[in-house]
Image: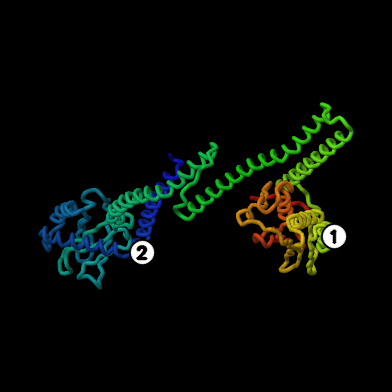
């Protein structure tokens, strides 16, 4: 409970309310310490007490000390003040605190009347700043009654006048904060709880999970990221299943041929030298086919894991492209395909020349494979804004839009526009990984009936280029 998000949110609201009230109280205390209003209120209270004493008690004008000694304690007790009778010179005649034993005889204040405001009865004693003095009788009386009361301090004033309102405000604030905290925590924890339940289900193998994309921006983003993650996990698992199925299918055909013809040799079905030679030739071809498939899979796995080291050195890409063109020119002539070349001046790039030759050979080989006789295959290259773009386009049948986004997947082949059985469907996947390892990108564009274009973009030489392939992400 104490570690739950809901409890912590509610506790945070309560702490905010309590701290706010404490800050208000401290601010009031600071304000009161620098404000003379408290002293004015003390004088007002003493004035009311003085008037009450004047109305209630008949104080003789020339009373002797004995009479004043009887009156002083009574007046002091009835009005909760200290009472001192003084003569016209300001000398103390009777002190209620001395008479009742609350103060020693030598502790009688030395009073001084304010001559400028004597009619108002203002009295002071500079040695006792903690007290407030007020004379109850006018200047014409032979005997003056002075009432004294300790000054009200800021803390005392705050406790007497603001404690109750502050406590009431605290109760109301805490009550409202609990209600608001419950509402807000429910709105926040509900999507978090759903996300937690979905994550728990995924941990137990149930990938058919999505969470509502709602709530504050952060939770909205978290839910969207979770849904995207689950979609990618599902796609990855499906890709793994497809991968295993495709590998099994691709290996099954040559293994069946190898097993069949080897069995024919063993049981004597292929007895004559011609039959044995033909069977051995087929076995060798199928074994070579399996070897190429396994080599391609291992190459792809190393590229995926970032374990395929690229020998990245400054190379002339123009020379690499011309070398690839030269190797495929004869094949293009045999198929009556025009191989066009448009290579603009290119800067030096830091790359693995053999790997790039593999990329462009694969792209040109595919273009020649799927372009009918009399068609055109074009290789173009140019540089702009620190990027070299190499494009291979053909005038073949093209790739349907539904298939175009999947052509870089392993073992994916477009049967409608690519003849089945030609290749394993991993060439473009390897091509893409090599381009990514060089920090580049590859994309395909196609229009059914008009042809296909592959574009490879590679960064030019940079001072910080390394020689190791970057690990594949996402």
Image quadrant in which you'd find residue 91: bottom left
Residue in the foreground of this view, choosing between 252 and 174: 252
Residue at horizontal 37 percent and vertical 47 percent from the top: 182
The mark closer to the camera, 2 or 1, is 1
58 left or right of 239?
left
Residue 461 x, y percent position in the rendering:
77, 62
419 w.r.t. 124: above or below: above
Q: Please, what secondary structure does the residue beneath circle 1 have?
A: helix
Q: For the point 57% across and 44% down, which residue is it?
A: 234
**Which numbered tag is attached to residue 326?**
1
Above or below residue 463? Residue 74 is: above
Give the x, y percent position of residue 2: 44, 40
Determine crowd level at label 2: few under 14, some 14-19, many 20+ residues with C-alpha closer than 10 A: few
Cα separation, mark 2 vs mark 1, equals 96 Å
Report if residue 99 is visible in the image.
yes
Which residue is identified by label 2?
Answer: 34
Tell me which label, 2 or 1, sits earlier in the chain.
2
């Amino acid at each position: 409970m104490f570690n739950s998000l809901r409890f912590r949110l509610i506790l945070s609201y309560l702490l905010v309310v309590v701290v706010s009230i404490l800050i208000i109280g401290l601010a009031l205390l600071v304000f009161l310490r620098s404000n003379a209003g408290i002293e004015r209120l003390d004088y007002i209270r003493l004035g009311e007490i003085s008037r009450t004493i004047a109305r209630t008690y008949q104080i003789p004008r020339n009373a002797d000390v004995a009479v004043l000694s009887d009156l002083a304690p009574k007046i002091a007790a009835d009005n909760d003040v200290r009472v001192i009778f003084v003569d016209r010179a300001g000398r103390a005649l009777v002190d209620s605190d001395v008479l009742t034993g609350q103060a020693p005889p030598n502790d009688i204040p030395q009073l001084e009347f304010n001559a400028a405001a004597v009619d108002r009865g203002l009295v002071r004693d500079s040695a006792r700043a903690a007290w407030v003095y007020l004379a109850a009788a006018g200047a014409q009386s032979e005997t003056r009654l002075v009432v004294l009361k300790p000054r009200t301090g800021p803390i005392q004033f705050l406790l007497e006048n603001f404690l109750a309102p502050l406590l009431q405000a605290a109760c109301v604030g805490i009550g409202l904060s609990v209600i608001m905290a419950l509402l807000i925590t429910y709105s926040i924890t509900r999507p978090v709880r759903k996300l937690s339940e979905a994550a728990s289900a995924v941990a137990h193998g149930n990938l058919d999970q999505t969470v509502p994309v709602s709530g504050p921006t952060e939770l909205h983003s978290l839910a969207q990221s979770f849904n995207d993650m689950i979609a990618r996990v599902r796609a990855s698992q499906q890709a793994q299943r497809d991968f295993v199925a495709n590998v099994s299918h691709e290996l099954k055909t040559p293994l069946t041929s190898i097993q069949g013809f080897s069995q024919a040799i063993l049981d004597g079905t292929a007895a004559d030298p011609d039959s044995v030679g033909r069977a051995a030739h087929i076995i060798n071809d199928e074994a070579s086919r399996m070897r190429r498939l396994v080599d391609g899979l291992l190459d792809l796995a190393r590229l995926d894991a970032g374990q395929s080291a690229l020998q990245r050195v400054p190379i002339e890409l123009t020379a690499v492209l011309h070398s690839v063109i030269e190797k495929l020119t004869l094949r293009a002539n045999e198929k009556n395909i025009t191989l066009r070349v448009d290579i603009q001046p290119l800067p030096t790039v830091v790359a693995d020349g053999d790997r790039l030759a593999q990329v462009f050979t694969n792209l040109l080989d595919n273009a020649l494979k799927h372009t009918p006789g009399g068609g055109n295959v074009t290789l173009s290259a140019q540089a702009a804004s620190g990027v070299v773009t190499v494009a291979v386009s053909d005038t073949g049948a093209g790739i349907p839009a539904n298939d175009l986004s999947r052509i870089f997947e392993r073992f994916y082949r477009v049967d409608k526009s690519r003849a089945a059985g030609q290749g394993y469907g991993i060439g473009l996947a390897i091509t893409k990984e090599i381009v990514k390892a060089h920090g580049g990108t590859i994309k395909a564009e196609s229009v059914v009936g008009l042809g296909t274009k592959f574009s490879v973009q590679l960064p030019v030489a940079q001072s910080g280029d390394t020689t190791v392939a970057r690990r594949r992400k996402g």
